[in-house]
Amino acid sequence: MVATALFITLLGAATLWAGDRLGVGALVEPGAGMWPMILGGALVILGLAMLALESNVPAEPLTDRSWLVLVALAVVAAFVWLFAQVGPTVSTFLFMLVWLKLLSGNSWRVTVLVALGSTAALYAIFVLGLSISFPDDLLTATG
Amino acid sequence: VLDSLLSGFEVALSPTNLIYVLFGVTLGLVVGILPGLGAGATIALLLPFTFGLEPETGIIMLAGVYYGSMYGGRITAILMRLPGEASAMLTAIDGYELAKQGRAGPALGISAFASFIGGTLAILGLTFFAPTFASYALKVGPAEYAAVALLALVLACTIGSGSLLRSLAMVAVGLLLASVGTDPVLGTQRLTGGNLELFSGIGIVPVAIGLFGVAEILHYMENTHVANVIKSGLRDIFPTRADWKQSAMPILRGSGLGFLIGVVPGPGAAAAALTSYSVEKRRAKDPSRFGKGAMEAVAGPESADNAASQSAFIPLLTLGIPGTVVLALMFGALQLQGITPGPQMVDEYPDVFWGVIASMYVGNIILLLLSVPLSGVFIQVLRIPMGVLGPIAIVISLYGAYSLRGSIFDMWLVIAAGAIGYVMRKVRLEPAPLLLAFVIGPILESNFRRALLISDGDLSIFVTRPGSAGILVVLGLLLVVPLISRRRKGGLLGLEEDVPVDAPESIAENPAPGERR
């Protein structure tokens, strides 16, 4: 894949640029940019080599379910946002509900039972069992 | 050694530790059986839990998960051609053929004993060699350390299934990610983009959970596998005498090979299994049976991967250099406890060192006892569909990432790493070299820079010191030889199966770093 090789090369170039701005120093007294510069150089070389030698490696084809991955990532992101706002219980329950029903296509019975069960079990393990302080919870008012 | 080992058994046999070893190996067995959720992801998920435990208890549990999963990986490999762990790939080939012939029982039985024997022989080796190794390692300077760290990374690349070039690129990306944060010598910020959360660097755990756990679930989602379960032949677990005769030597050879390959940082259990498979195939009177249900092809690789997973603890506990992803996580767990793995560990934390080793004896016996009668029962776990297991695993991942530092930012990192891991899979870039480089990065950088401090900025320190020079020569050979042999085969893609041949040679050329001084 040409895009992959180009990405690696550009990442290396960006690192070289950032390393240069940090100050390279000398080998006797390396600056903060020295190590990034070395890595950036390596990335550029490897990226160009990939471009020259391996640009014909095919990517794994997308399937007709691939768009689900994007949806799933969005759902997980929404979960994290909600988790930060209202704590673990409500966010986890809603997340499980959406995933089990919309993404996995389970029956409502399975969806509701698993969502309730897993939310409760995870709460019991992490909050009650391990007493990890999660963000303040809307329902239980603990955190 | 025996005295220390006995005191180790005292630690390992304490009621608490016994419970955790039992918990660890059982969990390991289960996740080993489950395809998708591997030992790496599970240990990443368990990391936050070890925080509240005694150091030895935490490591004993995590180690149990690790070798337990090696044990469990074979079960679905044999029954459904679904290797639960990468290292069970080879077991899947002939094991599944045996199962189709209605010989699933003997295959499971032989593989259980093969795993037990391989594991136990390797722990014996670990017990007697690790302390010697550690005393050598104490004499190693930063130049050698940097060279060994680099060697571990390159070895990890040459053994993987992808191309060398692409793996090396992933190593560079991993090293780059590891360098985000504070400069270890100067204390200035670098590559953080001014983001406060990044000043202390990117955590190992969110990256590991994302790249392995979340990416795997995402990938699974778009490819719904339909597994065909074989139900017959589960009743007679016990192999016949002929099976035993066929398997005895492959098991012994596999154990020896596995032990040696495990000691070299990098290749890991999958490479050990691969090597054993190719050795047995070459020795066989009728190699054409391989791939069609040869018992040796199950026995050898199984003993090799278990032996390697045990002996891989040697470089971690004595040099502080993790050779595989799972051991990198173990490294993280020790650090969480304020213990830096390395040559001083035997003396400074004998309880942890010997306790973990002794617990491996115990764990292996538990595994044998558990897996022979319970093989059938464990398969029931597979009835939980991924559509249900997936979201639960994601929530656990995110909870785990959060609880380590109480950081929402780390949860976002998990998502980002998950998305990146998914894309990497799509474009055929391997996550394992990236994560290894990410963990080894700081070791490599700080030793590289310390060596330069000693030599007043003279790079020749790496070639004038015999230890590091020797390692660098091996490293150069490792990079050049496959390039030439692949070109001869007319392709640089590295998709050929010439990989296992490299492994035993690299061991012969690569004695303990201390010995070269």
Image: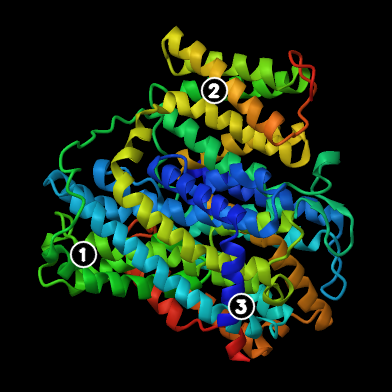
Badge 3: chain ID: B
Element class at badge 1: helix
Q: Alpha carbon of mark 2 to alpha carbon of mark 1: how far?
A: 43 Å
Q: CA gap, disc 1 to disc 3?
A: 37 Å
Q: Quadrant location of residue B320?
A: bottom right
Image vertical order of residue B300 relative to residue B190, above or below: below
* Residue B178 in the image, given as x and y percentages of width and height: 71, 54
Which is more foreground, mark 1 or mark 3? 3
- Numbered mark located on residue B4 in the image: 3
Secondary structure state at the residue bearing disc 3:
helix
Q: Quick check: can you spot residue B87?
A: no
- Report if residue B441 is visible in the image: yes
Residue B197 image-quadrant placement: top right
**Chain name for mark 1:** B
Q: Which residue type does callout 3 highlight? A: Ser
Q: Are the two marked residues, 1 and 3, in contact with CB atoms closer than 8 angstroms?
A: no
- Checking the image for residue A72, the label placed there is 2
Question: Which residue is farthest front?
Answer: B15
Front-lying residue, B58 or A51: B58
Pointer 1 local density, CA inside 10 Å: few below 14, some 14–19, many at least 20: many
Q: Mark 1 points at which residue?
A: B296
Are labels 1 and 3 on one chain? Answer: yes
B174 or B487, which lies in front? Answer: B174
Q: Left of B482 or right of it: where is A24? A: right
Q: Mark 2 lies on which chain?
A: A
Q: Tell me the SS state at disc 2.
A: helix
Q: What residue type is labelled 1?
A: Glu
